Image: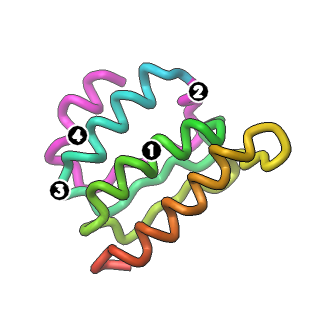
Amino acid sequence: MESICTHATRCLKLKLSNFSLHYPLVINMLYENFKTNLMMYLIDLSWTNLSPKMMAQITDALVINPNKIRTLNMSYNSLNFKEEEEHSIQFVENIVEIMSESKSI
């Protein structure tokens, strides 16, 4: 995973669907990459076992750098408004902000 994130600064598409990414170190690496990668336009993190906190952290990075994103797939990860309401709401607010600021969506 570290290799993917290290070389992903030139990456246009990142598809990690069906991989378990439920590790803070992995999410931190993705966060650092997403906030600085100006080229990436497709991100597929579906079916990756992300928690609401992890999804919020990922979208925090995309709020910083939303300009090129055309496709963001985070389906089949779990938003939980009962147990992790704060992070679930933060994720939804981030998505709204990304959509409003992006020139590509």
Above or below: residue 80 compared with residue 66: above
Left/right of residue 30 with respect to residue 77 in the rendered view: left
Label 3 residue SS: loop
Which badge, 1 or 2, is on the more N-terminal residue? 2
Q: Position of residue 18 (x, y in %)?
A: 59, 39
Residue farthest right in this picture: 82
CA separation, marks 1 and 2?
12 Å
Rendered-image quadrant of the N terminus: top left
CA separation, marks 1 and 3?
15 Å
Give the number of the mark in front: 1 or 2.
Answer: 1
Label 1 residue SS: helix
Q: How many marks?
A: 4
Above or below: residue 71 compared with residue 8: below
Q: Which residue is mark 3?
A: 38
Residue that appears at 58% across and 52% down: 90
Residue type at mark 1 is Ile
Rendered-image quadrant of the C terminus: bottom left
Which badge, 3 or 4, is on the more N-terminal residue? 4
CA separation, marks 2 and 3?
25 Å
Which badge, 4 or 1, is on the more N-terminal residue? 4
Q: Nearer the viewer, residue 13 or 66?
A: 66
Q: Quick one: label 1, few (<14), some, or many (20+) residues within 10 Å? A: many
Q: Nearer the viewer, residue 90 or 34?
A: 90
Q: Are marks 4 and 1 in contact (CB under 8 Å)?
A: no
Label 2 residue SS: loop
Q: Which residue is mark 4?
A: 8
Which badge, 4 or 2, is on the more N-terminal residue? 4
Give the number of the mark in front: 3 or 4.
Answer: 3
Q: Quick one: label 4, few (<14), some, or many (20+) residues within 10 Å? A: some
Give residue 58's mark. Answer: 1
Query: Residue 15: within the magenta?
Result: yes
